[in-house]
Structures are given as C-alpha cells and as structure tokens.
Image (cartoon, rainbow, N blue to C red):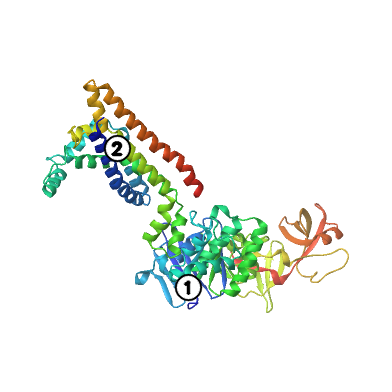
Amino acid sequence: MEEIGELVVELAQEEPLPLKVSFAVRPGELLALVGPSGSGKTTVLRTIAGLYRPRSQLIRCARWCWADSGRGIHLPPQRRRVGLVFQDYALFPHLSAKDNVMAALGHLPRSARPERARELLAAVRLAGLERRRPHQLSGGQRQRVALARALAREPRVLLLDEPFSAVDQVTRRRLQRELVLLRQRMPVPTVLVTHDLEEAARLADRICVLYRGETLQTAPPQEVLHRPASSLVARLVDLANIFTGEVAAQHAERTMLRWGERLLEARKQPGFSVGQRVAWVIPPAYVVLHRRDRPSRGERENPVAGRIVELVSFGENTHVTMEAEDRARIQFTVSAHVAGRNRLAPGAPVRVSLLAEGIHLMET
Amino acid sequence: MDWQALTLSLKLAFWACLLLVPLATLLVRWLIQAPPLVRRFCQVVIALPLVLPPTVMGFYLLQLFGRGSPLGRLYERLTGESLVFSFEGLVAAALVFNLPFAVQPLERAFAAIPREVREAAWVSGLSPLATFFRIELPLAWPGLISALVLTFTHTLGEFGVLLMVGGAIPGETRTAAIAIYDSVQALEDQAAAAMALVLLAVSFLTLALVYLWAPAGERAR
C-alpha cells in the first residue's frame, strides 16, 4: 500500500455557495460530516475528490498536496487516489460488477486486473456475482460493488456520501458492520457524509457539524451530543432541553446558574462571567427521576417538580416530557418498567433532579 | 428505374451520416455543459430546420455557398470548384438541414447520463477521453443509432433544399427524391412509382430496425 497520512481540508468561499470548512482526519479515523440538507456536506466531499473547485482551498493528504489555491495547485480527480462511494453509487450501468471494478484498476498492468477485480469483489462478499449488471443486483449488493470500485484504486482517502441511505434497515446494519471491519483492515482517513445523527454517533470517531457551509464543531460524538459548542449546534443535533439563563456566581467547584426563579448548580465552566446571559443544555441522560419506591442518587441536586405532559414508549424505553411549575418543558428517558412502577402517566406529578455534571453552558 | 439518382441519394446519405454524427456528438458534448441560456439559444437555432420552409433554407444556403460569400470564395480557392450545384454542396447542405435530426437524439442520450456516473469515471482514474469512449458513448448508444438513422432517412427524403442548392444535374446533384419529381413532371408515372416505392421501403426498413432494436438496447442497460 502507498504511504498513508493525514487528510487536511481547508475551504473558504463566499459565492456561489458559502464555504468555511476546516478539519483534519487522521489515518484510520472516521469523521462524520453531519448537517441539515443543503448544508454543503456533499460539496465538501466533491471538493476533496477534485470534482468541485471553491475559490480558496487547501487539501493535503499524507505528503501530497492535492489543491492549494494560494499556489495555483489543483490536481484533477484522476490524480488524487480517492475512493468515493456516491450516494446513488453511480455504477456504470452498462458494465458488469467486475468491469465496474476493473475500470478503476488502470494503475495495474492489464493482465493483473481481472484477478484483482475478483479479489476485491470477493472481499465485499460478492464472489459469484461478477458478471451481473448493476440492475441485476440488490441495493446492498450495488453498494458493495461501489465500495469495491472505490477500494480498487488503493485510495489514500475513503469518501462515503450517504452510503447507507438507499438500503433497508437490515441491510444497513450489516453494511455498517462491514464498514467497521473494513476500517480495521484499511487504515486510511475516511469521511462519511450522513444526515443520520445516530449513524454518525455509532460509526464515527469524530463528528463534524456543518451548517450553511461552515464547520461549527468537530469533536467526538459524546462531546458534540453532551457539550455542543453553541446553541446552534445543540439545535442542529436535535438536543432536547435547551434553555436560557444567567450566570449567577462562579464558585470554586461549581458554576451557579439562574434559571427563571431557580438557582441551579452546574459543572464548573470558568469561561463565562457572572451576569452573562447564556444558553444551556442538559442531555436527557442527566435528568434523574425521583422514584417513589426508593430515593436515588443526587436527589438534592437541582430538584425540579412538575407534571407529566407526554409519555412516548419506544420499545424498552419511555420518553417523558414534563412541564415544570414555570412551564419549562424538560425531557428525559426511563426504562419502560421504571415508568410503570412509578405510575408515570400524563397529568401525574413528577419530581426530577438536573445533575450538575450534565448542565452545559453555551454562548447564546 | 433511375439507378444513378438512387446511388447518388445513398451516397449523399452515407456522407451526411459519416460527417454529421461525429460533429453533432462533439457539439452535444459541449452543449450539455454550456450555460443554460447559451444551451437554450443553440437548441432554438438547431431546431430551425424543422420548421423553416425548404425554400427559405435553400435560399440562405445558396447565399452562403455562392461566390458572393466568404465561405463560397474560400472553398473555391481551396478546391478550384464551386460549392453550389455540386455534390459537395449537397453534402454541406445535408449537414445543415439534418442538424436537428442528429443533435436532438444525441442530446437527449448524453443529457440522460447522470453527472455522477461521469464523475465516478474520473474518480476511478479514467481520463476524459477514456470516460467518453468507455462510459459515455456506450450509454448514449441508442441516441447515436437514432441520430444515424434519422439523418440517413431524412437525407434520402429531402427535396426542396437539395433542389435549390444543387439544381438537378444528373449524376451530380439529381437525387432520388428529385428524380421522382422530374418523372411526375414528365408524366412517367411508372418510373415515379418505382422510385417512390424504393424510398418508402428503405425508410420503413431502417426505422423498423431501430424501433425493434431500441427496446433490446434499453434492456441491456
């Protein structure tokens, strides 16, 4: 395999579509680009592949410079050694699975190509289907042909554009598992574009949140989900429990937060000054129900009382929305048997604690 | 049966196909990536031969090919011959009046190739030329066949433009369609009927071939 190294991407442009992108992906790392549709995810991938040319760009991969607008460098896609799986796979419809893969083996001597194509198809578990045309394959099989074709070039970067969006749930799970296994064998930087946040959190080492062409936060999934960089990121990743408040005091170990009439203890966050208006978020996992049967940990921490307004069961879990006395709505999740034992029902009174550790402050 | 006229028509149709289809392919490749406004404008110009009276087109072509125009003078200086009232002039005219018949099916075929398929070829390492021959051309094949057949049959059938640009010089510019007209004028109904039947049969057979073949072509995709 050729030399493998870090992928560095820096893009900037105002027109025709705004871009302000900056991230790096280490070898073997999977970065998920997430964001609402139209946020520029696919454009970023296309730029890395050399299919789109923004005004200002710097793209380096290992020791190669693929694009540097400052120095007038822009390698065409043919010279970038990128493995790109398109959203709808973009297989060559008139060629068999094997010929699709062989088309990307131009760097090998002609005589070595058929054997290598067979190996690549076998590696994605398509042995025996080499002669099928794309329309004779299922969605999952097509996706694997596209993956085999992307890997055929021995890419230095793997780019996946919504690779699981066109297949059913069962196939998706299986393909995702195979992707994880593949990454162990092939330690290249990988960029996955997805609008599915759960998928991103499950597969990615880090998530990069993109909004209107701008990278807002690049961090491990848990950090993005529990400590979003801004209230915009929090809304984009669809976090529940986003509120506004005011920093009341900065103690040695705690930051005190005024939330309406209440004074909440929060994890120490020294970057905010006393009196500052802030947005804050608490992930549902840090909202603890006060049980009727036995007291649990942290009951004295930021207690809030209210009434249940909505109960939604998702399999084992029950999502609860409560309304506090001042009408603020707080969401949390309990397992179904806890919901039953505590006789949670719409209209019933309920008490919870907001664990200080989970209260995360953000600029408004 | 005027074999000379029929041979001339077939020869003209052959040359029209041979020259026009590659030219139209190049034009279409440029057209599908041109700015939308430029593309629309070109589409209108290219479609003109569909609606213009043949005499109008013939008139302008005469002006264009004649000794009075730079093109006519250039051709005469290069070859020593005139472009009007010559077989070469007919071929040149055929390139113009067949334009929509060659361009439109090709344009539909090339425009139907998804952008991503072309890009996938580039990312796979195929050069633009290799992408054209190995990916685009095979995918646009049905359009190419349509363009060939329409150009061929329409050239066989063209009458007014060829009469205006070529006159009706036997062996040089008197095509089968013109021969039918001459026969009718000379009250030689039998000769006209024979030639008409031949043209009808050739046109029917070529079209039938395409229509029977096209679905098979689509299945293969």
Residue kind at label 1, given as amino acid type: Val
Residue corresponding to mark 2: B155
- Answer with the quarter of the image where residue A218 lies: bottom right
x and y percentages locating residue A134 in the rendered image = 54, 55
x and y percentages locating residue B44 in the rendered image = 33, 40
* Spatial CA span between label 1 and label 2: 58 Å
What residue do we see at 37% from left, 52% from top?
B33
x and y percentages locating residue A228 in the rendered image = 61, 67
Give SS at disc 2. Answer: helix
- Left or right position of B73 against B134: left
Residue kind at label 2, given as amino acid type: Thr
Q: Chain of mark 2?
A: B
Give the residue furthest to the top: B187
Residue corresponding to mark 1: A8
Q: Is residue A315 visible?
A: yes
Give SS at disc 1. Answer: strand
**Which sits in the foreground, B156 or A268?**
B156
| Count of labels in the image | 2
Q: Is residue A209 visible?
A: no
